[in-house]
Image: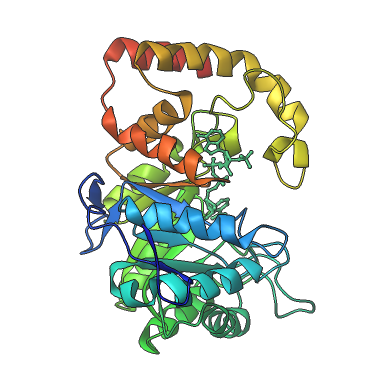
C-alpha cells in the first residue's frame, strides 16, 4: 500500500491485511515460523537493476505476508549491491517493521580478492557478517548461513565461526546451504555441542532437481532442522514463461546465470506436459511447482525469485491449492523422471 505525504514523497504503509492469506510453517523443531513462500534477492536487486522495481516487489511481498527476505554477501551484480539496495529500501519502507521481518544473509562463495574472501574460514565469515550488516544498515540478521561446503577447512572451524557470530549478537540463528547429507549430520552434531540454534538448510529443490530426496530431507528431520527450498521454479523454467519461445527480457535470454537457452530447449517438452497437468488442476505451472515442493513435511518454506510484483502475486496463489491426488503425483513423476 502507498500513500503520499505532504511533501509528495511516496510513503509506505503495509497492508493491514498482510497476515490474512499467508500460511506459516515451523522450521524443524525451532520456535521460528516462516511464510510458506519466501522472497530471494539473488537477481533483480543489484545495481544493474531498477531499484524502484525491487522496491515494488518487496512492498508487494510484505503486503502479502512474506516476512522472510533472503540475501547473501555476493548477490548483485556487482557483489554486495543487493544488500546495499535492500538496506536503502529497508531504511525508507521497512524500518518500523523490522521485528516483523526475518532477514537472512550468507557467506561462502567468492566475495573479495585474495585468500580470505571465499569458502569457509573463520577469517572470511567473521569479516563478511560485519560487511553485510553494514551494507544493510542492520544490527543483526535473523539467520546467517554458511553458503556452501568447504572441502579444505575443518567443519569445526566453520561451525565455530557461526557459533561466535550468534554469541556476538550478529545473528539469531544459523543455517547451512548446499551441504550433502553426511556433512549436514556432522554440522548438526557440532552445532548442538556448541549450543547454537541450527534451524535451516537451504537447498536447491524443484521438479527438475530432486537431489534432496536422496537422504538430505531425512537427515534434516532426524536433527530437527527445517529445509528452505531454493530455485523451486528452476529459475523460471517451471512457469509459463518459455512455453512459446524465449522472451528477450527473461533470465535464460540474459545468459547471466546457470539457466541458458540449451537448458530451456532440453526441458521444454516436459514443461509443456507439466503445464497441462497444472491446467487440469486449475493452476498455473509456477503455482503447481511451488505446491509440489510444499507437500514435503520437512520443507518449511519455498524460496522464490521474481522480476516483477505481478509474478509474485501469481506465485502466491499457489497457496490456494496445495493438495495433490495420487494420480496427479504419479503423472507428474512419470513426466519428470
Ligand atoms: N543458497 C544458494 O546457493 C542459492 C542459490 C540460488 C538461489 N538461492 C536463493 O533462492 C532465491 C530464488 O532463486 P531463483 O531466483 O533461482 O528462484 P526461482 O523462483 O526458481 O526463479 C525465479 C525466476 O523465475 C521467473 N519467474 C518467477 N515467477 C514467474 C512467473 N510467475 N512467471 C514467469 N516467470 C517467473 C523470473 O525470472 P525472469 O527474470 O526470467 O522473469 C524469476 O526471477 C534466490 O533469490 C536466492 O535467495 C540460494
Res. 99 visible in picture? yes
- Residue drawn at 27 percent across, 31 percent down: 320
Residue at the limit of the structure toward the bottom, as seen here: 168
Report whether 50 appears left or right of 288. right
Colour scheme shown: rainbow
Q: Give the vertical position of 222 relative to 73 (above or below).
A: above
Q: Left or right of 148: which side holds 257?
A: right
- Identify which residue is drawn at 35% across, 33% down: 318
Which image quadrant: the N terminus? bottom left
x%, y% of residue 133? Answer: 51, 81
Q: Residue 244, relative to residue 39: is it above or below?
A: above
Of 12 and 240, the residue lying toward us? 12
Residue 107 in the image: state x and y as whole percent.
58, 70
Relative image position of residue 168 (x, y in whole percent): 40, 90
Left or right of residue 24: residue 206:
right
Q: Looking at the image, is 270 positioned above or below residue 250? A: above
Quadrant containing ligand 1 reads: top right
User: Picture coordinates of residue 63 (x, y %)?
Assistant: 33, 54
Q: Is residue 259 visible?
A: no
Amino acid at each position: 500500500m502507498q500513500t503520499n505525504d505532504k511533501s509528495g514523497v511516496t510513503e509506505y504503509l503495509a497492508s493491514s491485511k498482510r497476515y490474512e492469506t499467508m500460511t506459516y510453517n515451523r522450521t524443524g523443531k525451532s520456535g521460528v515460523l516462516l511464510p510458506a513462500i519466501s522472497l530471494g534477492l539473488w537477481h533483480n536487486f543489484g545495481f544493474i537493476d531498477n531499484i524502484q522495481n525491487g522496491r515494488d516487489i518487496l512492498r508487494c511481498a510484505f503486503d502479502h505476508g512474506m516476512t522472510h527476505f533472503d540475501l547473501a554477501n555476493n548477490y548483485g551484480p556487482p557483489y554486495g549491491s543487493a544488500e546495499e539496495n535492500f538496506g536503502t529500501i529497508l531504511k525508507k519502507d521497512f524500518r518500523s517493521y523490522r521485528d516483523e521481518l526475518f532477514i537472512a544473509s550468507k557467506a561462502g562463495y567468492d566475495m573479495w580478492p585474495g585468500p580470505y574472501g571465499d569458502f569457509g574460514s573463520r577469517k572470511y565469515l567473521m569479516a563478511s557478517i560485519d560487511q553485510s550488516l553494514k551494507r544493510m544498515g542492520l544490527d543483526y540478521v535473523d539467520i546467517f548461513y554458511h553458503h556452501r561446503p568447504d572441502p579444505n577447512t575443518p567443519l569445526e572451524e566453520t561451525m565455530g565461526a557461526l557459533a561466535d557470530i550468534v554469541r556476538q549478537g550478529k545473528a539469531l540463528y544459523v543455517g547451512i546451504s548446499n551441504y550433502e547429507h553426511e556433512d549436514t549430520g556432522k554440522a548438526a552434531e557440532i552445532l548442538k555441542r556448541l549450543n547454537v540454534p541450527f534451524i535451516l538448510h537451504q537447498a536447491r529443490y524443484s521438479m527438475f532437481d530432486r537431489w534432496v530426496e536422496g537422504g538430505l530431507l531425512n537427515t534434516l528431520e532426524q536433527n530437527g532442522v527445517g529445509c528452505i527450498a531454493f530455485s523451486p521454479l528452476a529459475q523460471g523454467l517451471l512457469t509459463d514463461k518459455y512455453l512459446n519461445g524465449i522472451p528477450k527480457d527473461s533470465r535464460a535470454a540474459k545468459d547471466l546465470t546457470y539457466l541458458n537457452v540449451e537448458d530451456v530447449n532440453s526441458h521444454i517438452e516436459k514443461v509443456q506436459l507439466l503445464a497441462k497437468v497444472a491446467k487440469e488442476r486449475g493452476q498455473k505451472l509456477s503455482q503447481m511447482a511451488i505446491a509440489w515442493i510444499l507437500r514435503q513435511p520437512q520443507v518449511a518454506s519455498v524460496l522464490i525469485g521474481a522480476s516483477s510484483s505481478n509474478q509474485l502475486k501469481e506465485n502466491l496463489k499457489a497457496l490456494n491449492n496445495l493438495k495433490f491426488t495420487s494420480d496427479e503425483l504419479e503423472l507428474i513423476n512419470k513426466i519428470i523422471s
